Image (cartoon, rainbow, N blue to C red):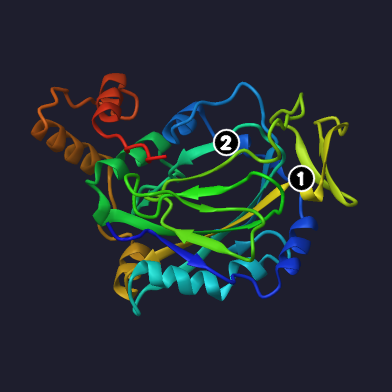
Amino acid sequence: MASTAVRIHPVWDDPAEVVDLIRGAGPFWPLANYAASDAEMAALGRERAAFTPPWFRQDFAREGVVLVPGAELILDNPRFAEAAGRLAGGADSVVRPRAVYVNIMGPTPFAFPPHLDIPAFRGFTRATEPVWLLKTMKTSGLFEAWRTRIATGVSWFYAGPGGDFHYWPDGPDGGVAVEQAPYDNVSVLADNEYTFHGVAPVGPPGSTMPDGLGRESRLVRDGSGWEVHGADGAGQARFDDDEVRITVSWKADLFADDAEADLHDRGEGALTLDTIVERFAEDLAARGVDIHVPTDPLADQAWIAALATTYQDPAPRL
């Protein structure tokens, strides 16, 4: 298969300017808060942890609207847009930057496992639809004509041990590519709904996590480092700058040309639940899967289990 990723170097005119922007933002909230439900965690191939790791996030832009003053520096980065155009595959491609978020990870003795991001389809997105359904739609391959391709560019600021970025640009059966600290003004831009990616443990071997972090914890700037506060404002942990791994994520919708973008904007031919169920039912029957079509396909457990069993993403080759 063709590579689903583009490496960018250099990605920033002035990396220090980006770091200063991030240090002036906040508070950052636990990454666990962005997984809305156990179903979403399951769709990502993970279970919700019984504890909260020191992984934090803040949205800098959403739906093309800047939320953190100065975040245009990231959202409007022309090198991301140029690489996304190459990923889209042609001179006529349309690239629409729409989101920026920043993750900050403290020392963690375990990996952020290889996973795929949540896809979007014309008429069906995570804003209104169950994540498990969107993931299954992508895995089945039955709805590619409706899928909105999303380019995700990631760039890192970290020079400590661990924290390697792993990704599979040639598919899960291809070899793994690795970006390692110290990160040198580099980015990997990919179709992350098809490109498995994950993060190695952050920090030196034997690193431990702070106890007592919860979904109400927040990470704030504190002089030359970062402090984690609890809901009551009390300090729970502190990290020096050289201990935290910063990731900038940039996302854009991709269209082959203006006609495809216009089709998306008009919502013409958008998917409906009836269409989705019908296509699934036809494919399941062709595969010899004996399952009746339910009246409530978003809640019928036998139907959901049949879809989950039939359509599975292969795990990447480590």
The Cα–Cα distance between marks 2 and 1, rounded to whole angstroms, is 16 Å
> Considering only vertical position in the picture, is 54 above or below 98?
above
Q: Is residue 170 left or right of residue 126?
A: left
User: In the rendered view, does 145 fall on the left or right side of 170?
Assistant: left
Looking at the rendering, which quadrant does residue 77 occupy?
Answer: bottom right
Q: Which residue is mark 2?
A: 111
Q: Is residue 280 left or right of residue 121?
A: left
Q: Quadrant of the N terminus?
A: bottom left
Extreme residue in the front direction: 205
Q: Is residue 296 something one can see in this rendering?
A: no
Residue 204 placement: quadrant: top right
Q: Which residue is mark 1?
A: 243
Instruction: Please state the horizontal and vertical placement of residue 108, each as a whole percent of the image.
Output: 67, 35
Q: Amino acid at mark 2?
A: Ala
Q: x and y percent of residue 32 in the render?
A: 61, 34
Q: Position of residue 308 (x, y in %)?
A: 30, 29
Q: Is residue 299 visible?
A: yes
Q: Residue furthest bottom?
A: 91
Residue located at (71% from left, 54% from top): 159
In the image, residue 252 sits, relative to residue 40, either above or below, namely below
Q: Quadrant of residue 200?
A: top right
Amino acid at circle 1: Glu
Q: Nearer the viewer, residue 307 or 243?
A: 243
The residue sitting at 85% across, 30% down in the picture is: 232
Pick the residue in front: 190 or 219: 190
Q: Which mark is residue 304?
A: none
Give x and y (percent) for residue 236: 83, 31
Of all residues shown, which one is farthest toward the right?
223
Q: Are the residues flagged by discs 2 and 1 in contact, CB closer than 8 Å?
A: no
Left or right of 56 on screen, residue 263? left
